[in-house]
Image (tube, coloured by chain):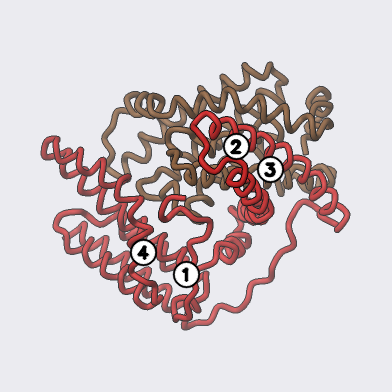
Chain colours: A brown, B red
Amino acid sequence: MVAKARTRDPLALARELSLAGLLGALGLLLPVGFHALGWGGKIFLPMHLPVLVAGFVVGPGAAASVGLIVPLLSSLLTGMPPMSPPLALLMSAELTVKAAVASVLYRRLRLNFWVALAGALIADWAVLALAAVAAGRFFAIHAPPVRYVAAALALSWPGTALQIIGAPLGVAAIERRVPRLVAARRRGSGEEG
Amino acid sequence: MSPGHVLDLYVKRDSPLHRLDDRAKLVGLAGFLVGALAAPARPPWAALALAAALLGAAAVGRLPPRALVRRLVPLALVIGGPFALSRLGGAATRAAGEVFAVRSFLVAGAFGVLMAVARPADLLEVGGRLPLVGGFAALSEFILRGTQLLAGEVVRTNRAWALRAPRPGLRLRVGALTAASISLLGRAAARSERVGAAMALRGFDGRLPPVPPGPLPLSHLAAGLAFGFATLLLGVLGRWL
């Protein structure tokens, strides 16, 4: 993002940074809201929703950055997800790829929303399996990756359903409030922010 | 809100550890993390020595034991569950479970102590000056500011819920939380337009204004290096001996 600063309109950059920042902030706050109601984060995946929505409304670089940062920042600010066992790192890898894939498919390649959503979810699961293998080496977790992903999916199906229902509603709410995002996507100009 | 799940883990105290420069704290943490990841579960002396070093740091930071225990309680399930399951397996599984539990508690404890004695914004300021992670630290600072902005809206929404439906059923709660989340997304986007325009008017050029680094006192650096090196050595020696 910073590297592109000299080549892009400062207003577009400022808008993209502020939109990414506020969606990232929601990624920190929504899990707190869910925990306040006593609903487990592993089941409802509240952090995933704003990050996924960020993938649909900002550029790939900003979206990936939000996905990378939010779990780590949440871990430092709230203690959840924990750094150790490395759930924060796993989530960081997952959300980075999920947001980036959603942004590339939806904003850059201008594919259908549902195709982009399916691509983002599949990429998320693939990264979860790879990250589980990598983290397992450091933390002596000897779970087969496919079984790990299957267990995670079985546990978090309400969260996946929430994303499938909530992401289109969230993106529609944002595009209604910020109509220029729709125009920017149609132009394919890359001026998401 | 569950215990240990709040938006700031900082414990306000006047202690040598609180006064230590944040860069020195990060140096100490880096050394400790390497030591913790290198330390074996058996023989246990290295892990015990690292735990003692951590408790020593908490004592120097005058951190109340109750606060530390409260923060580690939610982790007990995350760490204790897999550890308990590993006891049902063979020798290799049991050994892996021990390594997992020891490393997890040491790393989680180290981050717990760090976040109790350092403000997140100050740590991000240090990160912002680093060459590779500077851009991420800037976005993190922005997310922190956004959190403060939106937290007010969340509190107001919670109050409205409490007033309108003191004991809501599950269906009402799911519906209200979904509606509130979608509404917050829309409002955050609308607010980002205003914030972005204000930033551009103030001369934003793609990077947040840099904060010049203050001098790092030699005694602070020495303290961070000493803690980091000693704990790293403990972990590495525990593995080799």
Where A122 falls versus A24 (above or below)?
Answer: above
Residue position marked by numbered label 3 in the rendering: A20
Quarter of the image that includes the C terminus of chain B: bottom left
Mark identifier at residue A121 = none
Distance from disc 4 to disc 1, alpha carbons, whole Å, reads: 10 Å
Q: Mark 2 touching mark 1, by CB under 8 A?
A: no
Amino acid type indicated by mark 3: Ala
Residue position marked by numbered label 1 in the rendering: B11
Crowd class of label 4 (few under 14; some 14 to 19; many from 20; radius 10 Å): some
Distance from disc 4 to disc 2, alpha carbons, whole Å, reads: 30 Å
Crowd class of label 1 (few under 14; some 14 to 19; many from 20; radius 10 Å): some
Residue position marked by numbered label 2 in the rendering: A51
Q: Nearer the viewer, mark 3 or mark 4?
A: 4
Q: Chain of mark 1?
A: B
The percent position of residue B55, horizontal first and vertical second, equals: 30, 70
- The kind of secondary structure element at disc 4 is helix
Residue position marked by numbered label 4 in the rendering: B68
The earlier-in-sequence mark between 4 and 1 is 1
Front residue of this view, candidates B77 and A125: B77
